[in-house]
Image (spheres, coloured by chain):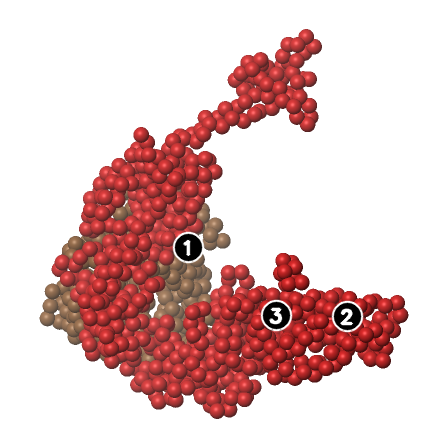
Chain colours: A red, B brown
Amino acid sequence: MPRGEYLLEVRSEEIPARMLEPGVRELATRVFEELMARNLAPREVETGYAPRRLVLVLTGLPEREPDREEQVLGPPVRAAYTADGTPTQALSGFAKRCGVAPGELSRVQTDKGEYLAAIKKTAGKPTAEVLADLVPRTLAGISWAKTMRWGSGEGPWVRPVHGVVSLLDGAVVPFTFFGVAAGDTAHGHPILSPAPFRVTGAEAYRRELGRHAIEVRPAERRRLLADSMRQRAESLGGKLVDDPALLDKLAAICEIPGVLEGRFDEAFLELPAEVLATSLRDHQSALTVEGPTGGLLPCFLTVMDRPDDPKGRARSGNEWVVAARLADARFFYGEDRKAGLARRAEQLHRLAFHERLGSYADKSERLAALAAAICDELGWTAEREAAVTAARLLKVDLATEMVKEFTSLQGIMGGIYAREEGQPEAVWQAIYDQYLPATTEDRIPRGRAGLVAGLADRLDTLVGIFGLGLIPTGSKDPFGLRRAAQGVVRIALEGGLDLNLEQVAVEAAKLYGDRLTRGAEQILDDLRPFLHDRLRYVLGLRGYAYDEIEAALAVGVTSLPDLEARVAALHRMREEPSFLTVVQAAKRIANIVKDAAEQPLDPSLLAEPAEKDLHAAFQGLRHEVEEAAAARDYDRCLQRILDLAPVLDRFFVDVLVMAEDPKVRQNRIALLQAIGRTVSRTARLTEVVVDKAEARGKG
Amino acid sequence: MQTLQDLILRLSEFWAREGCVLQQPLDLEVGAGTMHPDTFLRVLGPEPWRVAYVQPSRRPADGRYGDNPFRLGKHLQFQVVLKPSPHDVQQLYLRSLEAIGLDLADHDLRFEEDNWEAPTLGAWGVGWQVMLDGMEITQFTYFQQAGGMELKPISAEITYGLERLTMFLSLSRSIYDMDWVEGLSYGQVRKQEENELSRYYFEVADVGFLQQQFDGMEREAGRCLEAGLVLPAYEHALKCSHVFNVLDARGAVSVTERVGLMKRVRDLAVGCARAYVESRERLGFPLLRGEGDAVALVAETAQETAQEIKNAAR
């Protein structure tokens, strides 16, 4: 009884870790989709991979494609028979082509009249035949991040191919792939178990790989690694410092998930923990272990592509490399401290920030000036000195030996060196935290100097690159400007920086002198929507609805904390019963006044009670609304506007704005214009989406 | 105890047996074995080629006055080029490790992605760094492009870092302590040189003189190309490249100059690469007439490849 099980293993030279998962996923998806389109969908699809093999197992495949019947139209009936009823040439020719007698044809009615038709039967192909064509074609079509050629020009593929196992219910589904014939022979680990073995099916394949300690399921490899690393860390008397991204990588660079444990000289613990962890991670792909009192233990854990290390060679080798690396790091640390940040700063003119925007020395000068301007704008006089010092030193660590070696320590290293040189906490923390937030989970920089320096750095970059017209499009963002813009937004919002970012951007553009190819206005035209996009995203993450954000944005942005105060007030006020009335009134007002020029209001022309009441109510709260807005008490501001709801409602019921007398009409429009301005003091309420169901429920 | 000298002898012997021409180091300052004309130029065009040699490689900016136990301004590479890359090239490489005395069953060996790119040579390749017990001992590269031209056939380049490998096999604590040959340490042979070269590159080199040299060498390379002398032109391009590296280590290359100087070196290298292919074509790609499997394999596509390369050169 055939199980409909197909096993595919492609064995190649080592495929880069980062490409394995997407490659296998694409293979499985494409094979599945095409099988489904041909009515050959398998019941289950399983995938696996290791650096040297891609695995696909399909189960529950039908034996063959279903047979297909399709109707083929022949000649029209009127052209099919001669006057005496014998078939014409056209009819007998058609019948012959279809392989049936003229009498077996049926008649069908179409738009164009009655036709003769035949049923054409196509036998479905056996699944094996479909796979033999589909699989090599799909394999060759995988869109790897980078491909190569080899030998006399074979390829392109991700790496040279060495073997293919292709079995449907134990029988080889034959094809060739880059000159390699598919068969039933697999290989184990190239050094530990290189002998080939024959495979009969997926189960036997798994069993045989198990005998060779090979695990092709990446999730299982990762689990095994993580579990045994945690155990090792515990038996060392500490706790594994978790690093999920590194564990993913480790699970993708081995076929056999063996854990390697090593130690290093305790003397290296004098290095900052950041340096130890980075050196171990970047150079040795190793995780660290935290001791019970918080500091690191002098040991590390990484992977080896073998189950054990009986002669200890893998361990002694890794320990030797780690010792060499840490000695190197200690050397850099010593050299950098000997030189001091002041001397490193002299080297910044040799480091290009951007070929058209000058060096990091130029950038440092700009940052110092921009930080000063930001502090002045905010009135942060006490923090000014620290912020300017931090801004000037911000990029100095790019010239240190340590950061040249470990780029991921940029910022952190500068902060550590500044601390060791006795810079005040505000300064060294500002340097240390300058790249925060790098991800959505990251916190913003500590302290006011940190906020100012972080903001200055990002705005300088954004304005500089936008000033050259290099605006990110689609997925292309080589300077990481989206991340920079998001940093600006989060620092300004969460740091409570009450300042006009556009003014700061203009200042930043000024500091570039004549390096930019575009003027400040032109830059702002592109930068404003770019920042607003990130702002929408960040506010969305904070739980505000998109129409609330749009409504607040629509009346302009003076500072981000002010904007958020308006969004937040709107968000809270939305639950008020009278809110809907005001929104609907605002929409009505907007409709009425939309094409009208500004009109002066003449209270003496107000005649009807409802409009008089409205005017009186409006006069009474207009001032209060302005006052509340000036005090940023947008809740009160909106609340006062909600108080207008009943009067507004009555006005629209009782009063015809479009009165016949043009004077009366214009005066009523003038009243609505004035009210419209006040109603929109917090947000343009017309942007608020009124759900029909919501309107019915509350109306 | 494994010495540096043993390692050179064993690798030479192994690769000579695999049909490599045992070449000698290029007698010019270069940054890597790849720049030796027997790699950079020979990987171009359709002719098969197998070569192995030691190449002293200078990276002036990496010099540490002989003080750092792990870093050198001049180190030794053992370079192997196999063109076209044989199907079992990884196996061959594993056997070369066994030939230098490693029992691989006792070690952890991994091939981790590491692609190679040399913008000044208009060259890039795809491959790995080979990690032995956590130590990078070899760069393994399938050349894809050189001199701005697509390559066919593809060459495999295997570059062993000799100091690292020796140090690692003997688990020495310092480059300078390991044996060059029994009874004579690496430090005794090279430490003075490392120290003086560092002082020269970082402190003494005359910037004005070097800048003149760069201009002069570049001119001379151009004159050689005009005279149809590819190899002398390439040698002068290499000299430019080295002078650039010294200027860089000396701190005499500004941000804006850097881009321009690198482009000038690249233009020379690309010009030489194209001229080399043309010169080999004029000679009728003489190595294609040899015997052997590799040659036969390549010969089939020789004409086609030559045409493609000519097209690419235009």
Give the CA distance from mark 2 to mark 3. 21 Å
Foreground pick, A120 / A394: A120
Percent across and percent down for residue B273 are 41, 57
Give the mark nearer the N terminus: 3 vs 1.
Answer: 1
- Name the front one of labels 2 and 1: 2
Q: Residue at x 39, y 89 (%)?
A: A424
Q: Which residue is mark 3?
A: A576
Percent across and percent down for residue B248 are 38, 75
> Hey, which quadrant is residue A342 in on the image?
bottom left
Residue A604 is left or right of residue A374, and the answer is: right
**Could one spot residue A184 in this view of the protein?**
yes
User: Crowding at label 2, few (<14), some or many (≥20) Cα neighbours within 10 Å?
Assistant: many
Residue A580 is left or right of residue A606, and the answer is: left
Q: Are marks 3 and 1 in contact (CB under 8 Å)?
A: no
- Name the front one of labels 3 and 1: 3
Image quadrant where one finds the N terminus of chain A: top left
Q: Secondary structure at mark 2?
A: helix
**Could one spot residue A358 in this view of the protein?**
no
Residue A306 is left or right of residue B309, and the answer is: left
Give the CA distance from mark 3 to mark 1. 53 Å
Give the CA distance from mark 2 to mark 1. 65 Å
**Which amino acid lies under the numbered mark 1 shown in the image of this protein?**
Ala
Give the mark nearer the N terminus: 2 vs 3.
Answer: 3
Looking at the rendered structure, whether the residues under marks 2 and 1 are on a common chain is answered as yes
**Which amino acid lies under the numbered mark 3 shown in the image of this protein?**
Glu
**Which amino acid lies under the numbered mark 2 shown in the image of this protein?**
Phe
